[in-house]
Amino acid sequence: MSLAFFKGRFLPLEEATVSIATHALNYGTGCFEGIRGYYNAERHTLYVLKLREHYERFMRSCRIMRIDPGYTVDELCAATIRILKENRTPGDVYIRPLAFKADPVIKVTLDGVGDAVGIFTVPLGDYLPINGIHVMISAWRRVEDNAIPSRAKITGSYVNTALAVADAHYAGFDDAIFLSEDGHVAEGSAANLFLVRDGVLVTTPGTENILEGITRNGILQFAADLEIPSQVRAIDRTELYVADELFLVGTGVQVAPITRIDHRTVGTGDVGPVTSRLQSLYFDVAHGLLHRYDDWLTAVDYEKSEKGADILE
Ligand SMILES: Cc1ncc(COP(=O)(O)O)c(C=O)c1O
């Protein structure tokens, strides 16, 4: 049995169900997060990466979508910790908070429709290979912020991702890169993108229709700490073809090196030195091996019995 949190109660995941009349199921009017916990078997401890930052973004997404989650960031963090402690998953975990327009209302609007919040967890390994992937530039364009807000993690906007990923898979690629309507690079299908040219790390700004990624911020912090020069600026499509290194970052993909793009080899065709350094630092930090980054992690110790969610009881 996997414990979930739904409509104010802790209950088995199978019982956390909705009606087919639910507004969000019909119209995509929800927002969500994706959070990872990395298991350290020796310490019987799950390290949840940037828990608070994810719930802060969750709140911003809810604000854009006029959803009232009804809980504070602290309460949502506490509920998550309680679920993780109960589930005691002996491996890496993905945490999915979801807030949505829950009433059975046939009216396409955001006002006057009641909201609900759920949180559940699933075991999750690598979402994409982490030793080199082949991507295509998608024929689909990334949703523009003035059509569906790209800096909010909105359930309905993932139709955009699904279309691009499915086409990439049918064409034999691992994943897709989105351009915006103006032809600039936006991001990966569900990840932010970095390139390295002449030793400089480059990623696209928050104004290029990207989701403002939490991993992206972390990678920029690593670059500063390692004294790797970095720039946040617009990227042209053809820069991807001449980059020395390319990689995707995100909670799902972690740090996924791109070694081929549109049937062209990236750099030497191997995982590049900057990517490799950042990737290994990411995994060390995520597993709680570097005290310098302890503030990135919420340690959930399976051996300690105290509940984390008394705040909700
Ligand atoms: C569209 C999109 N861009 C970027 C990201 C990366 O964001 P984060 O690093 O906060 O997970 C995600 C989520 O994983 C995403 O869905």
Image (cartoon, helix red, strand yellow):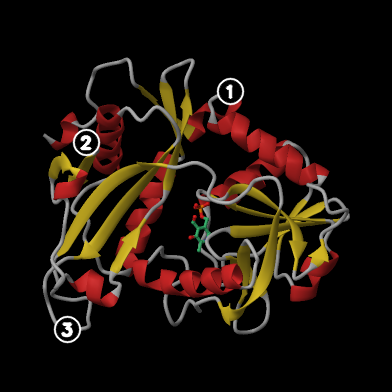
| Tag 1 secondary structure | loop
Q: Amino acid at mark 3?
A: Lys
- Alpha-carbon span between mark 3 and mark 1: 50 Å
> Crowdedness of circle 2 by 10 Å Cα count: few (<14), some, many (20+)?
few
Q: Amino acid at mark 1?
A: Leu
In the rendered view, would you say 160 is above or below 15?
Answer: below
The x, y position of residue 155, in whole percent, is: 35, 66
Q: Nearer the viewer, mark 2 or mark 3?
A: 2
The x, y position of residue 251, in whole percent, is: 51, 48
Q: Residue at x 75, y 71 (%)?
A: 262
Per the rendering, the mark at residue 289 is 1
Is the shortest distance between ligand 1 and the CB of mark 3 under 8 Å? Answer: no
Q: Residue at x 35, y 57 (%)?
A: 32
Q: Which quadrant of the figure has residue 81?
A: top left
Query: Badges 1 and 2: C-beta atoms under 8 Å apart?
Result: no
In the rendered view, would you say 178 is above or below 118?
Answer: below
Instruction: Tell me if 199 is positioned left or right of 176 in this view.
Output: right
Q: Which quadrant of the figure has residue 17?
A: bottom left
Where does the C terminus fall, quadrant-wise? top left
Q: Nearer the viewer, mark 1 or mark 2?
A: 2
Instruction: Tell me if 277 is positioned left or right of 146 in this view.
Output: right
Instruction: Tell me if 287 is positioned left or right of 3 in this view.
Output: right
Q: Nearer the viewer, residue 235 or 262?
A: 262
| Tag 3 secondary structure | loop
Q: Which residue is mark 3?
A: 107
Q: Amino acid at mark 2?
A: Met
Q: Which label's residue is closer to the chain start, 2 or 3?
A: 2
Instruction: Tell me if 69 is positioned left or right of 215 in this view.
Output: left
Q: Which residue is mark 2?
A: 1
